[in-house]
Image (cartoon, helix red, strand yellow):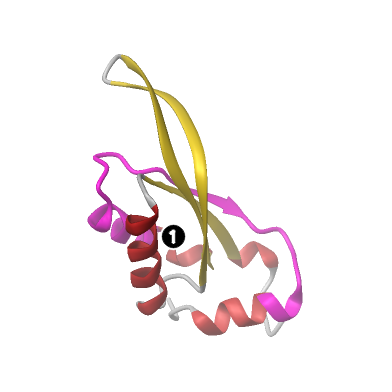
């Protein structure tokens, strides 16, 4: 526990984007609006999926955004508004623990609910 926070109070959001420019633009907006504390952008993902009945293969960028669990829906709505996809991937993965100093920083850098 750190200043009343537990790892379970936070999530890492897994988000995919079609390219680095869109990922960076979304990341900057989400951090500037204090919806997330940090976004890691990882290029080079290859995604295989079915879309509208057809098998697809695309290059994508993966984003990991750290935030408070209570902000997940606000982040999801914002990503949907900013994203170029009709159905963007936004999946919350629970943080079950971690560096107490990092968790404190994460809490400080995100908006109060």
Q: Is residue 15 left or right of residue 74?
A: right
Label 1, on which residue?
72
Q: From this view, report whether residue 18 is shown above or below residue 112.
A: above
Q: Is residue 9 left or right of residue 71?
A: right
Number of marks in the rendered image: 1
Tell me the quadrant of the picture where the N terminus can be found. Answer: bottom right
* Residue beneath the point at 30% across and 61% down: 78
Residue 47: image x %, image y %?
Answer: 46, 31
Q: Is residue 28 left or right of residue 2?
A: left
- Badge 1 crowding class, 10 Å Cα cut-off, few under 14, some 14 to 19, many 20 or more, is many
- In the image, residue 37 lies in the stretch drawn in magenta: no
36 or 47: nearer the eye? 47
- Numbered range of the magenta stretch: 73-102
Residue 49: image x %, image y %?
Answer: 42, 24
Q: Which quadrant of the structure image shows residue 77?
A: bottom left
Q: Which quadrant of the structure image shows residue 6?
A: bottom right
Q: From this view, report whether residue 6 is shown above or below residue 8.
A: below
């Amino acid at each position: 526990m750190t200043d009343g926070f537990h790892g379970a109070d936070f999530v890492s959001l897994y988000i995919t984007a079609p390219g680095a420019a869109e990922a960076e633009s979304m990341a900057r907006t989400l951090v500037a609006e204090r919806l997330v504390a940090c976004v890691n952008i990882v290029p080079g993902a290859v995604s295989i999926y079915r879309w509208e009945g057809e098998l697809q293969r695309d290059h994508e960028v993966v984003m990991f955004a750290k935030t408070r669990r209570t902000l997940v829906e606000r982040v999801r709505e914002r990503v949907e508004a900013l994203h170029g996809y009709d159905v963007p991937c936004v999946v919350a993965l629970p943080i079950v623990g971690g560096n107490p100093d990092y968790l404190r920083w994460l809490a400080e850098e995100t908006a109060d609910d």
